[in-house]
Image (cartoon, rainbow, N blue to C red):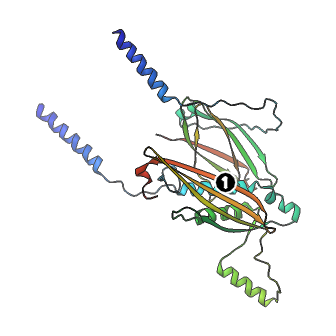
């Protein structure tokens, strides 16, 4: 009986270690010199599992020298497993009309366990005023 | 009772088999979207991503963004060809065409038209107007690029990395911008057949 319990425990331990990947440690300068314009966001979570496992923790925007909007999203994998997500940015002009592009579209990003990554996007033209970032989990 | 449950079992098995045997009808999907096929080659999503990332990088380059303020006019770009340095058949107009379109629609640059009709009409106008030296085809920047492939196989797994690289050169033959995008794919040997 005791032996059976030990085997079960060993099995669970193996399963857990088999699932987890190697997480990422990071170091950065504490006193930032960059002036970051952090913006408020509005979220619609239709996939609660994805919202639990992964999220955008910070959004900041800037304009380049030509007046084109740039958006940077700091994204984080909250889990102990590697995670691959599809993401896409849609841009809207001053009349809230979508601006189409020939390039871009859905792109895949791989996140190591507990990894956070900043991904920057540049608007397709000076007309872009607003944006929407779409996230989708990739099912294995 | 036994006979009835036997019939029900047979019916269920028949339905299951019919479900399995049905072929998938052709249907429309989002081009290059999340349902599109992923192969070990270069897919539409790869073309769109490469073009999107390369164009975004260009739209942030100071040589282009500051040009109008310095010169009082938009920079003129000649989008050349992207050379395929792999041994695969890849339609690289999928990348250069998308870069051309997004650069043009950005409102930041003017693009030189290289089609035969526009060239002929421009030459005719220059002739009729007695233009000694026609410089309408002169660009401020020339865009060119390459795609390379790095392949590796280990223990039945194949990995292919496609490297898109573009350069923007000026009239003084200086490269003023270069950007590299790597796209890596991994699959078993069976999925790599044909590429």
* A51 lies above or below B125: above
Q: Residues within 10 Å of mark 1 (few under 14, many from 20)?
A: some
Give the labeled residue for mark 1: B180
Where residue B54 sits in the image (x, y, percent)? 67, 56
Chain letter of the residue beneath label 1 in the structure image: B
Secondary structure beneath disc 1? strand
Name the side, left or right, on which B47 lies relative to B29: right
Q: Quadrant of residue B48?
A: bottom right
Q: Position of residue A99 (x, y in %)?
A: 66, 56
Q: How many marks?
A: 1
Residue drawn 45% across the image and 23% down it: A14
Report the front residue among B43 and B15.
Answer: B43
Res A100 visible: no
Residue shown at 78% from the left, 74% from the top: B138
- Residue A124 % position (x, y): 70, 56
Q: Could you tell whether B16 is left or right of B144 in the image?
A: left
């Amino acid at each position: 009986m005791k032996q059976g319990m030990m085997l079960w425990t060993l099995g669970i331990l193996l399963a857990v270690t088999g699932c987890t990947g190697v997480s990422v440690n990071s170091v950065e300068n504490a006193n930032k010199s960059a002036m970051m314009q952090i913006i408020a966001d509005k979220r619609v979570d239709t996939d609660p599992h994805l919202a639990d496992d992964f999220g955008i923790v910070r959004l900041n925007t800037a304009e380049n020298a030509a007046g084109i909007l740039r958006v940077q999203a700091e994204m984080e994998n909250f889990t102990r497993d590697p995670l691959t997500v599809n993401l896409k940015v849609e841009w809207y002009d001053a009349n809230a009309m979508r601006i189409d592009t020939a390039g871009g579209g859905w792109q895949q990003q791989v996140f190591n366990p507990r990894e956070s990554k900043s991904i920057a996007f540049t608007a397709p033209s000076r007309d872009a005023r607003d944006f929407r970032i779409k996230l989708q989990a990739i099912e294995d | 009772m036994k006979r009835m449950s036997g019939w029900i079992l047979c019916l269920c098995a028949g339905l299951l088999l019919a479900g399995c045997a049905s072929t998938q009808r052709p249907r429309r999907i989002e081009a290059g979207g999340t349902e599109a096929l992923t192969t070990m080659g270069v897919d539409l999503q790869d073309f769109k991503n490469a073009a999107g990332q390369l164009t975004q990088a260009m739209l942030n380059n100071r040589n282009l963004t500051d040009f109008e303020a310095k010169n009082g006019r938009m920079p003129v770009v000649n989008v050349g060809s992207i050379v395929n340095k792999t041994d695969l058949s890849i339609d690289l107009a999928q990348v250069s065409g998308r870069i051309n379109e997004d650069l043009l629609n950005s409102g930041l640059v003017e693009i030189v038209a290289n089609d035969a009709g526009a060239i002929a009409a421009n030459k005719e106008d220059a002739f009729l107007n007695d233009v000694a030296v026609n410089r309408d085809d002169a660009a401020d920047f020339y865009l060119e690029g390459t795609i390379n492939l790095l392949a590796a196989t280990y223990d039945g797994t194949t990995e292919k990395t496609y490297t898109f690289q573009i350069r923007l050169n000026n009239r003084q033959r200086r490269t003023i911008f270069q950007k590299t995008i790597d796209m890596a794919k991994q699959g078993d040997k069976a999925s790599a057949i044909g590429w």
